[in-house]
Amino acid sequence: MTGHHHFEVVAWRADRRLTLYVPGIEASTTVDDPRVAEDAVRDLISDLTGVDRGEITCDIRLGRPWRSGI
């Protein structure tokens, strides 16, 4: 894959960690330090999709992911 790839990310605090969820690939990761959140989510996306991390941009917003049926 080449080019620019943009992903929406939802973040929330849980158990003293920051959970980062990427709905576009239905994957999540956690970090202790919010300052490394963007790097962590880029690594996650790159590992799961094969997209070079330098081609990934993220829009991280605080909240909870919407779930159907709840």
Image (cartoon, helix red, strand yellow):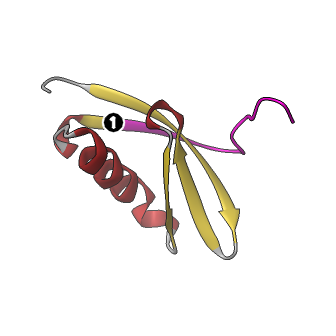
Q: Residue 60: horizontal and vertical position, in percent? A: 52, 42
Residue sitting at the far front: 69
Residue with the most extreme right position: 70
Q: Position of residue 38 (x, y in %)?
A: 40, 53
Q: Give the range drawn in magenta.
A: 57-70
- The structure residue drawn at horizontal position 33% and vertical position 56%, both measured from the top left corner, is 39
Q: Which residue is drawn at 41% across and 38% down?
A: 58
Q: Nearer the viewer, residue 56 or 69?
A: 69
Amino acid marked by disc 1 = Thr
Q: Is mark 1 on a helix, strand or loop?
A: strand
Q: Mark 1 points at which residue?
A: 57
Check residue 31 for magenta coloring.
no
Query: Relative to residue 60, is residue 7 depicted above or below?
Result: above
Asked if the magenta segment contains residue 67, the reply would be: yes
Q: Quadrant of the C terminus?
A: top right
Residue located 37% across and 59% down the image: 40
Q: Is residue 19 left or right of residue 52?
A: right
